[in-house]
Every structure is written in structure tokens, then in C-alpha cells.
Amino acid sequence: MDGAELEVRTLGPCRIDSPLLPLLGERPTTQHYIDEGDKVLFDDTLTMISSRKVPLDELPGFEPAGPRRKIYFDPSKTRVGIVTCGGLCPGLNNVIRGLVLELTNHYGVNRIFGFRHGYQGFIAKYGHSVVDLTPERVAHIDEDGGTILGTSRGQQDPGEIVDCLSRMNINILFVIGGDGTLRGARAIADVVTERGEKIAVVGIPKTIDNDIPYIDQSFGFQTAFAKAAESIRAASAEATSAPGGVGVVRLMGRHSGFIACYATLAKSDADVVLIPELPFTLEGERGLLTYLRRRVEKRGHAVVVVAEGAGQDLVEGLPESSDASGNRKLFDIGPELSRRITDHFAEHGTELNLKYIDPSYHIRSVPANPYDNVYTIRLAHAAVHAAMSGRTEMVVGRWRRRFIHMPIELAVSHRNQVDPAGDLWMSVLEATGQPYRFG
Ligand code: ATP
Ligand code: MG
């Protein structure tokens, strides 16, 4: 990682006094304001830092999030758009509410428009009207899951989106969504730049799978794994209550098994966790099925947690298909795994009572828990400070517990995944007692 990759673009010099100054009293201390040029260091161990062999001020670092003394946009003339795209995730409404309250109460921005149903909301042919977002409108929306703005998948033309922003004289666009949404946001920012316009595009990354790189944790993730742990508990109750009881719980995690790992550690009832990062074999002496059957024969019951992206190589020859946004559709591992377990137990004459639980939609749509309430509002504050100071083509995040700005480019550069050689997976193995890998 070098410093240039962490640099965030700005629309221009900041010349306007921040209206937050009076809020902080006559003599705000430096802790309240971020000094331009300050950095949150990328490295945090002596070994990492000394191996760079560069002077201190050349160490790579993220731009710290937070209020600036001088801002770029004049709040009384600033018009803001907010959009949510992609799948549901706990905390979307909290982010919308946090943005609106910070913009209105602290910056005095009072023209905030919510665009309906993701990027469709900017495109005339869909005919979605915009929502006026006021503190009254967003007062209690954090109590509900989902998003009051709606969402969608499917490609929209960034040129047409910028046409709409220009027509409505929007200065700042906040985009709440996953990797696809952020790629869309980058395309929008590119058109803005090509046309020489001054519109800030700032993202609040949404991923229930916790797979955005370089950020400690994504919002909604903690709510999600807490809810997922309830399903593991239910599967365990079912399994222990029947002879030959086996519970199979399918959790989210298309490419990364964080929810499966954390939910398992939160409720240590699982005997086996399967994640996309570690391919596994079903058949054979060292395969999953034999392991599971022996476990049931010995202990009477077992619980298997499987992330949706695990074991995608188990079924061959399925036709490739994708959703409206071009994401490859996964085959549903849960029912397939349940079927293979059932067949295997039957072949060996072992009694089986299998219960299959798929709580995905239930988990996605619950309101955020208190931790995510706090996290989302702080991300929203950081996003507003960033945008008002003219930052663009960036997302807010938290790096080693500090809120930071990160270029979109970096946020979509790769996925954060469970490290099979790391301490998280080691803890899962310790909690379940399963082998490092099946097969
Ligand atoms: P999730 O994590 O739920 O998948 P996501 O943001 O990745 O969230 P997508 O459905 O993939 O969800 O994308 C959301 C929106 O972003 C869609 O309108 C999609 O067309 C758009 N989008 C996706 N990829 C790109 C891209 N490479 N360029 C421009 N727009 C994109
Ligand atoms: Mg995605």
C-alpha cells in the first residue's frame, strides 16, 4: 500500500467557515476539528512502520474523517440527494436519518431529496417521484428495517443519472450500497468530472457480509450475526430434541464467511461451519458426511452452519445465470447439502431427523441493534463532514477504530475474506472441534 492509493479527491479549496464553529463554543479545541494533512496511519506496529524505511511524514495513511474548519459548499445553497441500492441490510434507515439530521441541524442544509428505488430513481422513464427528506420525515425511521427509499438492482446509465443531478441542481450525492453500487457511484463521479461539474459523490458502504476491504467492520454486520446466532440456537434445540437430530443453517456470505464464523462464535452450538473460503469434500473417509454421521452416532445430534457461497463446486453443469445487476446467481447449497446428508445417513442405516433453517431474509430486514445504531450515525456524520468539505469519489469507513475517508477505487479493489490461516478461523475450529478442512 502506498500513500497515493489512499489519497481522496476534492472538488476544490475550502473557503467557507464551518457553521459548526458556534456549536463547539468560542474556542473549539483542535480535537474537534481535523487538521488538513493529518493522517490515520496505515501501519500500526513498529515492525510495519520501520520496514517502510521512510521519514515519518511520508508514512502512508488514510485521511481522517470529521469536521473541517473550512468547508467547500455554502450550506444555505447546498442541495443534497440520497439513494440506497442493492440488497437490504440492517441500518439503512439509520444512515438516511443520520445524514438528514446532521445536514439540517448542524450545517443548516434544508434541501435534501431521497431518490426512490436505487439508481432507477434518477431515470425519467421509471417515473419514481423524489421524497423530501426532513427531520420530521426521518424522525423514527431507524426503528424499522429495510429502507424508506426503496432499492433496486439493474444497470442504469451514469450519464442520465448526472443529467438528473444537474437538472435538480444537486451538489452532493450520498450513495448507500454495496460493491456494485459503489462501482456505479464511481461511474457517476467520472461523468461529473468529464463534464466539469462540481458534484460530490460520497458513499457509505453497505455489506451485510462484511466483505469491504480495509474497514474494521461494515454497518449491520453485528446485527446480522446476532440474529443469525438465534437460528443456530433454534437448530440446536431442534437437533438435541430428536433422535438422530441434525440442524442445517444456511447463512449469508456469498464470498466471505464472516457471518457464519461470528454467529458460530456468538452461539457455540455448531459442530461444523462451512465457508466459501475453504472448499470441502462430502464423500470419503475424511469428507464431511462421514464426519457428521460419526458425530451423530456418538453424540446423538449435530448442527451444521453453511454460508451461501460455500461448496459451489459440489454441483457441476448447472447453467450460469445472473441477477439484474450482473451478479452471478449461486446455486442454493442449503437444500443440496440437506439432501446429501439425508442420502448418506440412509445408506448407512443411521437414524436422521434433519431440520433445515434459512433465515436470510429475516436477518437482512431487521432493525439495527444498539451497536449498529451508534455505528451508522457516526458513519453518517463522517459522510456529511466529508461531503461538505468537497471530498468526492470516496467512502467513509473505520480503520483500526478511527473514522476515515477512503477512495472508492480502493473500496471496490477486492473483497475482505476470512483468512483460513488467521486467528478468526482458528477460533472457529476451537469452538466447533471440526478439522481444519474436510477432504
Ligand atoms: P449487494 O451487496 O446487495 O449486492 P450491491 O450494491 O453490490 O449490493 P448490485 O445489485 O450489485 O448491489 O448493484 C447495485 C446497483 O449498482 C445496480 O443498479 C447496478 O446496476 C449498479 N452497478 C453494479 N455494478 C456496476 C458497475 N460496474 N458500474 C456501474 N453500475 C453498477
Ligand atoms: Mg454486491
Image (tube, helix red, strand yellow):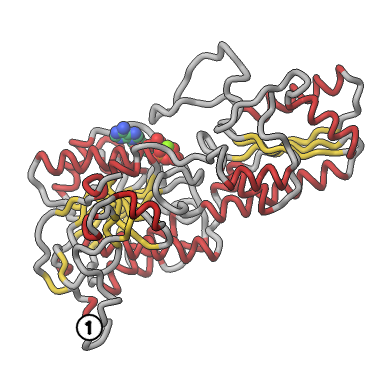
Front-most of 343 and 416?
A: 416
**What residue is shown at x 48% (from left), y 17% (from top)?**
320
> Which of the 4 image quarters holds residue 367?
bottom right
**Residue 435 percent coordinates (x, y):** 71, 34
Q: Is residue 376 above or below residue 204?
A: below
Disc 1 element? helix
Q: Residue furthest top?
A: 317
Q: Along the line of sight, which residue is nearer the eye, 299 or 377?
A: 299
| Image quadrant assignment for residue 283 | top right
Residue at 36% x, 32% y is 154
Q: Is residue 14 left or right of residue 92?
A: left
Quarter placement of the C terminus: top right
Q: What residue does disc 1 label? A: 22
Residue at the spot 20% in from the left edge and 76% down from the top edge = 19
Q: Does any portion of residue 40 appear in the rendered image?
A: yes
Amino acid under disc 1: Pro
Does residue 130 appear in this view?
no
* 325 is higher (above) or lower (below) than 65: above
Left or right of residue 71, residue 324 in this image: right
Q: Quadrant of ligand 2?
A: top left
Along the line of sight, the residue nearer the viewer: 343 or 145: 343
